Image (cartoon, rainbow, N blue to C red):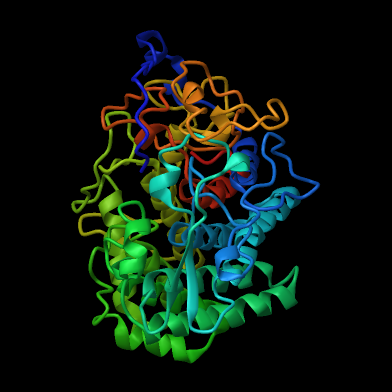
Amino acid sequence: MKNLSPPHYALLFTALLAQSPLFQSSYHEYHDALSKSILFFEGQRSGYLPQDQRVTWRANSGLSDGWTYNTDLTGGYYDAGDNVKFGFPMAFTTTMLAWSVNEFGDLMPSEDLRNSLVAIRWATDYLLKTVSQPNRIFVQVGDPNVDHICWERPEDMDTPRIVYAVDAPSPASDVAGETAAALAASSMAFRSSDPGYAEILLRNAINAFQFADSYRGAYSDNSNIKDGACPFYCDFDGYQDELLWGAAWLRRASYDDTYLSFLQNNGETLGADENINEFGWDNKHAGLNVLVSKEVLEGNMYSLQSYKESADSFMCTLVPESSSSHVENTPGGLIYKPGGSNLQHATTISFLLLAYANYLERTSQSVNCGNVNVGPYSLRQQAKRQVDYILGDNPLGLSYMVGYSDHYPQRIHHRGSSLPSVKDHPDLIACKEGSIYCNSSNPNPNVHVGAIVGGPSEDDSYEDSRDDFRKSEPTTYINAPFVGVLAYFAANPSFS
């Protein structure tokens, strides 16, 4: 996603490490990993940081965001290792954090649940600002093409903080639909602890969905948005899935039959049965089908049966014993899809495996995969293999979560982590002045605890290089689903 190209100094982890006994299944401190996966979000914060900020190498940033529209757009998260706030992946990140709490929050220790809600609220407070004006949604702050030329701390940003807005009747069904999903899911997460805030979130989710449905189309098709959003977070897979996804979350949060009817009447026309084996910031189909299946399994809502059939089909592709299994794995067992930032697939798929296992278990059901019936235990086994691989049970014996175990990436592609903190280096480090830190072979001075990097190649190799951003850059949407996954295994550490 970045266009900065320092000289290649990649350090391939040694053959000695590749033979590490850690690859033999080892005991993992899932609770430690859970706490760190949540802490990561504090290192991604934009805006005014609170007194209880735990990631102390970060400071206030982006304090003038929104001024060109005479509105406050401070806050939110930087998506990855740069200093841009992209609304599309931020909203998806928020949805997955909220789903983690909704699905697995009752398993979390109280401190981790509290910190998860804080992480969600940091995002939702910002998302509320993006939909605060009638018939308008703010979809991005910051020009990525200029930002990526620089290597500077967010606290030093001197690049244009361009605000990208979509005004009706121009469409933004994808971002508005995902924002509706994020606010609706988050309203459920806050319902018991802060019902007033939950009501605000739900009300704004309804309005965001109305915008998405009324003005149909992809946000990145707008001429004033395309150059800023693409190729980074273009809508490559169409906006239709976000309409269904937003409706599904509103149905679950509000119990309103309006959204049930939307799912019943629009599934076929909006392609609910297409691309059913994908799930991520751009494609919601597999997640949509799992989410809607909850109402089929637990609520006997058979008018939504087609969604469950697609969810069953997806699960069967993930189970090696199934005749329809076709997921690609690395030799070490990691789910692999080409295109970079591969661990986003491993974490989202692991989440869906565990969520679906819950729904099956509560209703004493299994999935018929032709030659084999697959139950909750088998789905959880597949998820655990992915989790343990990420935490170090892999050919390199390397944890892909920074700060977890003794062996983890030292040179992640992340500006704030790789540059000295404002506390240690108070003087400005301008746009190009940071290049010496980017090009350095030294480890990052600030350990971004909890950050999960993009991950290894299809042959399980990994180069500890800032230059290789597809492998070494963390993102919020890799971490968000992993919060729920780790909550499950922290509560069930002896599962095998």
Instruction: Please identify the quarter of the rendering in which residue 127 is found.
Output: bottom right
Q: Position of residue 472 (x, y in %)?
A: 42, 32
In-image side of 296 versus 237 (left or right) = right
Camera sees residue 279: no
In-image side of 270 versus 284 (left or right) = left
Q: Position of residue 43 (x, y in %)?
A: 62, 42
Q: Residue at the spot x=60%, y=28% of the render? A: 447
| Viewer-nearest residue: 22 or 341 | 341
Q: Residue at the spot x=68%, y=26% of the render? A: 425
Look at the image and tell me in which quarter the N terminus lies: top left
Q: Position of residue 274 (x, y in %)?
A: 23, 68
| Viewer-nearest residue: 64 or 202 | 64
Instruction: Please identify the quarter of the rendering in which residue 185 is found.
Output: bottom right
Residue extending farthest top = 16
User: Against 235, is 167 above or below?
Assistant: below
Q: Position of residue 414 (x, y in %)?
A: 50, 35
Q: Residue at the spot x=27%, y=44% of the render? A: 320
